[in-house]
Amino acid sequence: MQRSAAIALLRQHVHGDALVKHCLATGAIMKAVAGPLGGDPALWEEIGLLHDIDFEQVNGDMQQHGVAGARLLKVAGIPDDLCGIIAGHNHFLHTAPYETPVEISLQAADSASGLIMACALVKGGRLSDVSVKTITKKAKEKSFAAGCDRNRIALIGGLMEIPVFYGHALAGLMEIRTELGLE
Ligand SMILES: [Fe+2]
């Protein structure tokens, strides 16, 4: 699926601006880490873009989140393997360890997207002023962007050094910073 088609599908189900931006950002990070981890950047971006497509529909019901998304994506013609990855990304339901690079990256990208965008907001919305050092420092402050689970980011440490991951993630977000409302 083309990026534009994935975003159009996302916008059919997600209306909140913050959630759309979260999905765009998660997609951008997935795209950025795919190459270094031997994945397909376009496919990994699609997974990131669509991973929370059901979030408004389930309205906070974490017993449904992911499963409902996979169901509606299947109807939209998304391949079963992608639907399975999206269903499994809800770590409240998925209690087994994440094993594949794409699943692990989705955990890290899902959490790091919010952390890095929060770093940009404290810099007056200038993502260009955020460095790996900024992100590393802010990640250590537990109260900063507290909803961004550092343990889920740490999972990618088995695949690449965390500062290297932050570097890729930042580069990915920089590519779409105007879509995120950042400079
Ligand atoms: Fe998410």
Image (spheres, rainbow, N blue to C red):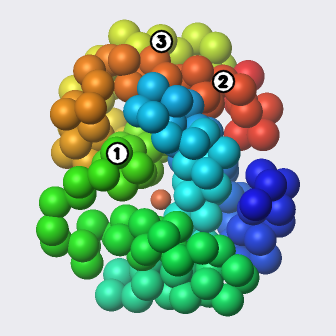
Q: Residues within 10 Å of mark 1 (few under 14, many from 20)?
A: some
Secondary element under disc 3, as helix, strand or loop, is loop
Can residue 169 be seen from the camera position used here? no
Q: Position of residue 76 (x, y in %)?
A: 72, 82
Of pointers 1 and 3, the one earlier in the residue sequence: 1
Amino acid at dot 1: Pro
Identify the residue under disc 1. 101
Residues at marks 3 and 2, CA–CA distance in whole angstroms? 11 Å
Answer with the quarter of the image where residue 6 lies.
bottom right
Secondary element under disc 2, as helix, strand or loop, is helix
- Relative to 35, does residue 147 appear above or below in the rendering? below
Which mark's residue is nearer the viewer, 3 or 2? 2
- Relative to 23, does residue 171 appear above or below in the rendering? above
Amino acid at dot 3: Ser
Label 2 lies in ligand 1 vicinity (Cβ under 8 Å): no
**Residue found at x 15% / y 68%:** 96
Which mark's residue is nearer the viewer, 1 or 2? 1
Q: Residues within 10 Å of mark 3 (few under 14, many from 20)?
A: some
Which mark's residue is nearer the viewer, 1 or 3? 1
Residues at marks 1 and 2, CA–CA distance in whole angstroms? 23 Å
Q: Residues within 10 Å of mark 2 (few under 14, many from 20)?
A: many
Identify the residue under disc 2. 174
Marks 1 and 3 in Cβ contact (< 8 Å): no
**Residue found at x 44% / y 44%:** 109
Identify the residue under disc 3. 131
- Relative to 161, does residue 115 appear above or below in the rendering? below
Q: Quadrant of the N terminus?
A: bottom right
